[in-house]
Amino acid sequence: MSIADIWAHGDFVIKILIIALIAVVVMAFEKGYQYFQTFRAMKQLRDRELLGELDGLKEGFVKNTLLEIKNFSGTSETLLNAFVGVKLDMFESHMMRYVTIIGVIAILAPMLGLIGTFIGVWHVFEGVGNIGLNDPSVIARGIKEVIVDTMAGLIVAVVAMVFYKTFEFVSSYFVTKFEEKLYRLLRGHDA
C-alpha cells in the first residue's frame, strides 16, 4: 500500500498526518542546510582572534551578527553588553527556527491519530448497530481501517521527535560555541 493509496482511501486525519509528516521532512532539510552553513561559518571563525577580522567569513547569519556587534556605536559598556545579549538571543532564536514546530507536531500527532481512531470506532459501532453482528468480518475490516489512524499518528510522532531532539541538541551546541567564541573575540584572544 503506497502513500497515494493511503491518501486516496484515508480519512481526513490520515491526510492531516501525511501533510504533517511532509512538513516535518521539509523543515528537517531546511534545518540540515542551516546547520551546514553555520558549521562552515564557525569553522572559519575558529581562526579569528579579533572581532575586526571578519573579512574572510562567508556571508550568512553568523557574519551578519558579528558585524552588527562590531559596528555597535553605543557609548557605554552596559549598552554593549545589553546589545550583545540581544544578539545572542536572536542567534539562538535563529538556530531554533522550526524546532519548536517540529516538537509540537511530535506531541500532537499521536493525539490526532487517537482522535481519528475514536471517530472510526464510533462509525464501526454505528454500522454494527445498523446491520447487527451477523458478519464479524465486516467489524474486523472496520477496526483494521481505524487502527491505521493510530499507527500513522505514532509514525509521525516518532519521526518528528527524533528530528526535534536532534535539532534541539545541535542548536544548543552551536549557540554555546558561538557565544563562547564571541566573548573571546570581544576580549581579543582566540578560543
Image (cartoon, rainbow, N blue to C red):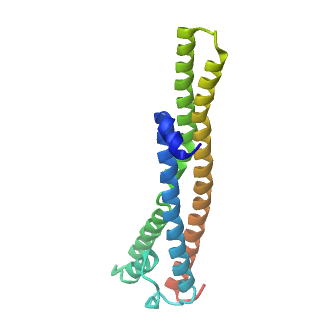
Question: On screen, 116 above or below 41?
Answer: above
Q: Position of residue 10 (x, y in %)?
A: 51, 35
Question: On screen, 124 above or below 2?
Answer: above
Q: Position of residue 63 (x, y in %)?
A: 44, 80
Q: Nearer the viewer, residue 160 or 189?
A: 160
Q: Position of residue 9 (x, y in %)?
A: 50, 35
Is residue 186 left or right of 190 when viewed as pictured? left
The quarter of the picture where residue 109 lies is top right
- Name the quarter where the C terminus is drawn: bottom right
Question: On screen, 189 above or below 177?
Answer: below
Q: Nearer the viewer, residue 6 or 72?
A: 6
- Residue shown at the point (54%, 90%) measured from the top left: 49
Q: Nearer the viewer, residue 133 or 173?
A: 133
Question: On screen, 10 above or below 102?
Answer: above
- Name the quarter where the N terminus is drawn: top right
The quarter of the picture where residue 154 lies is top right
- Residue shown at the point (51%, 53%) measured from the top left: 24
